[in-house]
C-alpha cells in the first residue's frame, strides 16, 4: 500500500503522513480532516502523471457520509518520501452524485 491508499481507503491519514512524509514536508491546501485517521473514502484515480520526482494525481473520493469530492494533488518526492503535497484543485460534487456515477 502507498500513501493515498493508506490515507483514504485505509482511513489512516495520520499513519500515512508519518510513514511517507518528513517533519519538513510542506502539506498545502489539504483540509485538517484529511490529515487525521478515521476518514475513509473510496478512491477513483482518473489520471496519474509522474515525471522525475514530481507526481500529479487527479482523483475522486466517495466518502462514507455520502459526499464526494474531485481533487487534483501535486507531489514532490525525494529519497522515497513526500517533500511537498499541494492541493491544486478540490471541488465537491453535487449532493447525491458519486464519483462512480461520473465514470471515474
Image (cartoon, helix red, strand yellow):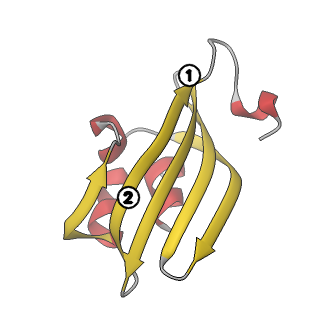
Q: Residue 10 in the image: state x and y as whole percent.
A: 49, 52
- Residue annotated with mark 1: 67
Determine the CA span between mark 1 and mark 2. 23 Å
Residue at the (56%, 22%) spot, across then down: 67
Q: Residue 72 in the image: state x and y as whole percent.
A: 54, 47
As drawn, which residue projects farthest toward the bottom?
79
> Disc count in the image?
2
Examine the rendering and report whether any part of residue 1 can be seen. Answer: no
Residue at the (54%, 39%) spot, across then down: 41
- Residue annotated with mark 2: 85
Is the N terminus in the top left, top right, bottom left or bottom right quadrant? bottom right
- Is 9 above or below relative to 23? above
CA neighbours of label 1 inside 10 A, class few (<14), some (14 to 19), many (20+): some
Q: Residue 21 in the image: state x and y as whole percent.
A: 30, 69
Residue at the (25%, 60%) spot, across then down: 26
Question: Circle 2 — which element?
Answer: strand
Is the C terminus in the top left, top right, bottom left or bottom right quadrant? top right
CA neighbours of label 2 inside 10 A, class few (<14), some (14 to 19), many (20+): many
Instruction: Give the label on residue 35, or none.
Output: none
As drawn, which residue projects farthest toward the left?
23
Amino acid at each position: 500500500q502507498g500513501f493515498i491508499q493508506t490515507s483514504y481507503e485505509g482511513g489512516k491519514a495520520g499513519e500515512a503522513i508519518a510513514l511517507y512524509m518528513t517533519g519538513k514536508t510542506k502539506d498545502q491546501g489539504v483540509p485538517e480532516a484529511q490529515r487525521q485517521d478515521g476518514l475513509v473514502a473510496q478512491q477513483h484515480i482518473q489520471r496519474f502523471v509522474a515525471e522525475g520526482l514530481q507526481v500529479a494525481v487527479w482523483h475522486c473520493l466517495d466518502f462514507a457520509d455520502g459526499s464526494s469530492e474531485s481533487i487534483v494533488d501535486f507531489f514532490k518526492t525525494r529519497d522515497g518520501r513526500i517533500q511537498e503535497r499541494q492541493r491544486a484543485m478540490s471541488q465537491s460534487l453535487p449532493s447525491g452524485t458519486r464519483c462512480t456515477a461520473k465514470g471515474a
